Image (tube, coloured by chain):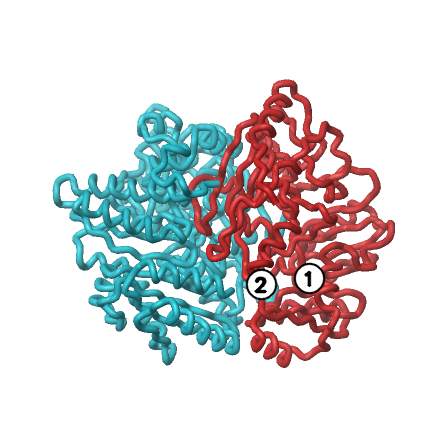
Amino acid sequence: MPPSVLRESLLPALRSFLPASAVLDTEENLHPYECDGLSAYRQLPGLVVLPETTEQVQHILRLCSAYRVPVVARGAGTGLSGGALPLADGVLLSLAKFNRILEIDPLNRTATVQPGVRNLAISEAAAPHGLYYAPDPSSQIACSIGGNVAENAGGVHCLKYGLTVHNVLGLKFVTIDGELVTLGGKVLDAPGYDLLALFTGSEGMLGVITEVTVKLLPKPERAQVALAAFDDLEKAGHAVAAIIAAGIIPAGLEMMDNPAIRAAEDYVHAGYPVDAQAILLCELDGTNEEVSEGIAQVRALLTNQGATEVRTARDDAERLRMWAGRKAAFPAVGRISPDYYCMDGTIPRQHLATVLKRISELSREYGLQVANVFHAGDGNLHPLILYDANKLGELERTEEFGGKILELCVEVGGTITGEHGVGMEKINQMCVQFNFAELTQFHAIKTAFDPHGLLNPGKAVPTLHRCAEFGRMHVHGGKLAFPEIERF
Amino acid sequence: MTDNDIAEQLAQAVRKAAAARTPLAICGSGSKHFLAGELGAAALDVTGHRGIVSYEPTELVITARAGTLLREIEAALAAKNQMLGFEPPHFGPKATLGGTIACNLSGPRRPYCGAARDFVLGTRIVNGKGEILKFGGQVMKNVAGYDASRLMAGSYGTLGVLLDISLKVLPKPAQESTLTFEMSADEAIRKMNTWAGQPLPLSAACHLGDTLYIRLSGTDTGVRAAHIKLGGELDTRGTAFWQELREHQLMFFAGEAPLWRLSVPAAAPLLDLPGKYLLDWGGAQRWLQTTVAEADVHRAAEAAGGHATLLRIAGRPRSMRLSNPVTSRLTRELRRAFDPSAIFNPSLNLA
């Protein structure tokens, strides 16, 4: 596409049907869109459009398709993998004006909303009916449901309540050719392939979401949390396994290591034991009877597993204080370091000790500190690498260190991203997790929806050429650091 | 049970078939052929590819080969006091894991716990080019690449040969009780959905004849407290009832009349179609025996916001009805993306 197409052909065509305020093209107006939550990656978009009707989205995509102009869809821009990073020669399509809750259906327990609606706003709207929307990514106060679907967002309650994919019942999306497609609805299944599952987590590569129907759950009668301190990380890992083995599925099960505990305690004074090598937060919810029974059992298990201290919240205020430290872990680390880089690997939990040991070795090797917070229930590890972007080369070293951590996750049978998505950030590590045939299959899926590769090109799935250049191909059995590990 | 990996052999068979463009019908025990009708192609027997590859009770993950018997998997889980949360129907003593996932079959627990597809964490497959591919993994949270593994659930073997499947498993509840209430179908729809919106340990809800059946699962005290709250009669036949419902062994399912499955919003009012009804899944899955014209059943289900599938009618291949032409096109394109030579179960029309 010659560069002039965007401004000389597409721009006037867009202006012909969109209000002036819905098409941005001056540098000043484009700046707010130059990055998402991963601000290390920045790029001014060619144009920004802010449609407010499905018909406008269809019209925009038809034009982009006709002119072969790439399109990047954007929700609230809170993503952490650069998935909404714009393209200089492309259109950035903001769904910010799609902010209406269309229907709360209390008897069917569904909410039908536009994609720009904030995650938390759904639960707020459902609250009068005693219902809520379960997935709760940390950014839930700001992130939009459309972005949640695009990234298959998680949160701290995933082990019990699932990811976005388990809580979405229906979608409407527009194809790159401008056709409107409806998947599912207020029903538990639809005929044909499970396109709903395929679409969830597809990072804006297959279509643009214009409506989402989610499942609402009854608010649990009661929630209670236990906090346990350990003098050893491995013991805390065993305690997690013991809780699961006892048949308990906690609503939340979080672990923090010593640097994370200290940072969080300094910041919010949650009452954490700062000398502990690890703390576990184990929350149970359900009926009053279930929670009472479960918490007594968890207390006993934690003590048996060698916890140096076990506390339960006396009231809801104390419960929220205990959580406040965990929830503020990222900004808390932000206070002790000029910059930090949040990683997002998932590992089979049995390899936790091995992985954390290796991370601390790498930390020494790179001369960069790490604090670890861990969704322990589901094996999702968030190492936070502390660095200073103003020091020459430190960001590059951090990225290399981060890449090593992700490759380590793959080696032990895990994945390079649990809930943040591949985006731009982990595109190289995709070459480690998948081989050429698998990547080729992904490209074929993409082509089925978007034959000219115009939707969010360059993200999520690397080209084979890129992988060849990256040079660290798919790890083959026998060449791995831990050959004894079963790796399905 | 020994672990037997014949992936390479299966991949070779697929490569050969692709080169010759010979259709293949992927076959397990055949327990679910009644869902698909005659496949009319050379059988690719996958029952030799069997065994539990790994099972980590404390990680809630099992990985098994597609030809493994479902009952063997359930026995292994039961030994650790765990279970498949989607309570799959078997439809035969030799039902395999592969067939269960390929058909995305789930039992009475489905609306409260999730469908087969919800528990799929990863798959290894042979695509139509005879390549062995791995998608997903053995961890709960994994968003690397498109969710091709979950896509396999309900694809009826038209996208690839399932080799290995990793599933999330759940602890068995300590206590289960079945309660019965005498009431009409209309009232049952209201009750089932009102209760589902309250913090109660529901794990199944079904209406048949003039009886509403409710199953509660959880801790002893939790189940007892819920029983007191809801009332109803304790049904001692409990477990057997849900199993017969799951396996279509209740008297309701007997007979020759065409049997329909309606997937509609759980609280949707009864459809205006004559016939015999059984409401399962809290109202979201309704079985209907009727002789009404097919087009009328489809229309009524779609008008209610769902869809209908004709399950039992002699000697006819199962045919999905995708009302949207774009969905049909995407379905065909996706199928071609996995199976460019169109060799997998070609008589199954999904678009």
Identified by mark 2, the residue type is Lys
Instruction: Please report the residue visible at 13 percent of the width from the left and 45 percent of the height from the top.
Output: A390
Point out the residue furthest to the front here.
B2
User: Could you say where residue B295 lies in the image, as x and y percent from the top left?
Assistant: 78, 45
Residue B20 falls in image quadrant? top right
Measure the C-alpha gap from mark 1 to mark 2: 24 Å
Q: Quadrant of the C terminus of chain B?
A: top right
Residue type at mark 1 is Gly
Chain name for mark 2:
B
Judge depth for marks 1 and 2 and give the one in front.
2
Residue A311 in picture, x, y percent from top left = 34, 75
Label 1: state its secondary structure: helix
At horizontal 59% and vertical 23% (from top left) the residue drawn is: B15
Q: Is B213 placed left or right of B56 in the picture?
A: right
Residue lying farthest top? B20
> For the residue labelled by badge 2, is the local secondary structure a helix, a strand or a loop?
loop
The residue under label 2 is B172
Badge 1 is on which residue? B283
Asked if residue B241 is positioned above or below residue B84 in the image, the reply reads: below
Q: Residue drawn 41% across and 41% down?
A: A484
Chain letter of the cyan region: A
- The picture places residue B348, in percent across and down from the top left corner, at 70, 35
Crowd rating for badge 1 (residues with CA inside 10 Å; few <14, some 14–19, many 20+): many
Tell me the chain of label 1. B
Let me know if marks 1 and 2 both belong to one chain.
yes
- In this view, the residue farthest toward the right is B256
Q: Is residue B113 above or below residue B159?
A: below
